[in-house]
Image (cartoon, rainbow, N blue to C red):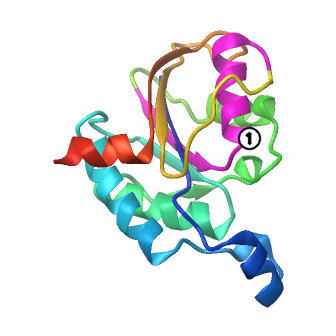
């Protein structure tokens, strides 16, 4: 199984949003964030041929990013996975992935937040839940998980920033 891990795109400023709206979970992408993610998703098409399952954090900015990603990669509708919300544990996300990995070669994509995604990738690749890498906004990485989704069993194939993904589209 391959796992595409994507951090949500640029969102409204957290401090400004909290003063006027209060709830961080409802903080949306900016117009610039949407535009850049659309360009980055086109770049991702050069690296990922298909997505069989698309999952997202319940937070608005992640759901909007997943929608852009899904449209660009002709993926199924995104499934909201509470374990992908900020603070979600790597083992819980791995458990969800294991239940949805299916048979044979499959590619799953997840959209979420830092530092949770970096911790998940570190746990899957190195077996430790401490930040060994950080996904930039709109950035992504691809992992090869094989048939066993467990700590230290994955392999990092590539890691790219949103800017690097947008350059692939050119």
Q: Position of residue 98 (x, y in %)?
A: 64, 28
User: Measuring 73% from the left and 70% from the top, which residue is drawn there?
Assistant: 14
Foreground residue among 95 and 35: 35
Question: For the point 54% across and 51% down, which residue is it?
Answer: 137
The local secondary structure at tag 1 comes to helix
Residue 16 vs 155, above or below: the answer is below
Q: Is residue 111 magenta?
A: yes
What residue span does the magenta drawing correspond to?
106-128
User: Percent from the top left, x then y, of residue 135?
Assistant: 58, 39
Q: Residue furthest left?
A: 170
| 18 left or right, relative to 139 | right
In the image, is 155 to the left or to the right of 134?
A: left
Dot 1 crowding, Cα within 10 Å, few <14, some 14–19, many 20+: many
Residue highlighted by disc 1: 116
**Residue under the point 66% across and 20% down:** 124
On screen, residue 70 versus residue 43, left or right, reads: right
* Residue 100: x %, y % from top left: 58, 36
> Residue 91 lies in magenta, yes or no?
no
Residue 73 can be seen in this image: no
């Amino acid at each position: 199984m391959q796992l595409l891990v994507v951090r949500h795109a640029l969102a409204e400023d957290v401090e400004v949003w909290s003063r006027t709206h209060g709830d961080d979970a409802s903080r949306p992408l900016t117009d610039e964030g949407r535009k850049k993610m659309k360009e980055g998703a086109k770049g991702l098409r050069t690296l990922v041929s298909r997505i069989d399952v698309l999952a997202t954090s319940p937070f608005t900015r992640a759901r909007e990013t997943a929608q852009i990603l899904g449209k660009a990669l002709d993926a199924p509708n995104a499934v909201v996975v509470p374990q992908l919300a900020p603070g979600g544990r790597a083992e819980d996300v791995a458990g969800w992935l294991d239940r949805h990995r299916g048979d044979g070669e499959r590619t799953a994509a997840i959209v979420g937040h830092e530092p949770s995604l970096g911790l998940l990738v570190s746990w899957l690749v190195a077996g430790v839940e401490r930040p060994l890498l950080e996904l930039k906004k709109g950035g992504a990485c691809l992992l090869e998980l094989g048939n066993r989704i467990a700590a230290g069993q994955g392999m990092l194939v590539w890691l790219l920033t949103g800017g690097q993904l947008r350059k692939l589209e050119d």
